[in-house]
Image (cartoon, rainbow, N blue to C red):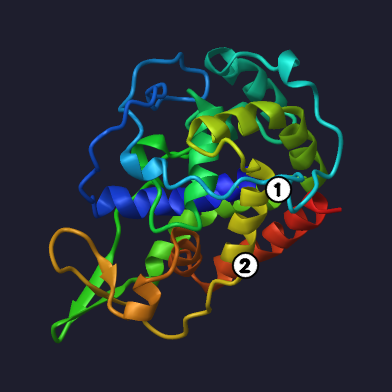
Amino acid sequence: MLAIAAIAGGIYLWQRETPRPVPPPTTATAPASESGAAAGAAPAPAQPAEAAPPVPAPVADGPKNPLPGAVPDAGTMPPAERSDAPILEALLKLARRDALAQVLNMPDFARRFVVTVDHLPRERIPAQLSAVKRVPGQLSVASAHGSMTLEPANFARYDAFVRLAESLDPKTMVAIYLRFYPLLQQEYRAMGFPNAHFHDRVIEAIDDMLTAPEVSGPIRLVQPKVNYRFADPLLEKLSAGRKIMIRIGPEHAAQMKKVLRALRAELVR
């Protein structure tokens, strides 16, 4: 699952460097504030209205995509507000603490992860609820003859995220996912999806990113106000997940699609 979160880091970066107005907060409980992997929880902005889209139609007979293994009883899950420590302990089987701290926003991680995954097929991810930290460095845009393009040098800024994603064992990722799935499902229902299955949304998010188009040549941008946007309206209409597969560059996109295919195979077996 960290592979999905790593991709979302690029979306968080893009939104932070070209900030958009944040919708008025809902009455949902605010997550813990952004800090390092070992930091304690603290109040953070409430979830934006966009994080609670319309409830899908009720699902009567289970998820479209059955879970690939058994999950614990929901009653054995730690409370959401005390789940960060056991989740971090489990994630340490995948990567070193310093590597996780470099990438992840651990406070209130279960909720952040669910929000991030759910919004990958949507227009954008609420930055204050991102499961991952901002990519280091500054966005580089080239301007010439009244036209702006995304500098290829930006692609290197995603190196650490891609390396982390490639280093993760898909079987171990899925084992951790199943271990905490009841908690993730609980958070998904709390977002406003009482009859939907988070596992289906995970598969949808992966499939959406796998269909991201390959863009050859310079990526032209426009900046009508504060935000950079793709000059090509067809690219601008893409989902958040597909857009980041373009922004990380063709080489990284090919690497991440390979990671996502391997992860998907474990999730649907």
Mark 1 or mark 2, which is nearer to you? 2
Residue at image x 38%, y 15%?
A: 42
Closer-to-camera residue (91/109): 109
The residue at 60%/18% (across/down) is: 83
Amino acid, disc 2: Leu
- Does residue 167 appear in this view? yes
Q: Please name the residue shown 65% across and 24% down the image.
A: 87
Give the SS element for disc 1.
helix
Q: Which residue is mark 1?
A: 167
Q: Which mark is residue 210?
A: 2
Quarter holding the N terminus? top right
Q: Is residue 7 above or below residue 60?
A: below
Q: Earlier in the sequence, mark 1 or mark 2?
A: 1
Q: Are marks 1 and 2 in contact (CB under 8 Å)?
A: no
- Image coords of residue 132 (percent x, y): 47, 40
Is 97 situated above or below 269?
above
Q: Quadrant of residue 84?
A: top right
Image x and y of residue 112, in percent:
49, 34
Q: Position of residue 167 (x, y in %)?
A: 70, 48
39 shown above or below 199: above
What's the distance in space between the residues labelled 1 and 2, CA to CA? 19 Å
Q: Is residue 104 visible?
A: no
Q: Residues within 10 Å of mark 2 (few under 14, many from 20)?
A: some
Q: Label 1: how many residues lie within 10 Å, few (<14), some (14-19) or many (20+)?
A: few
The residue nearer to you, when weighing 170 against 161, is: 170
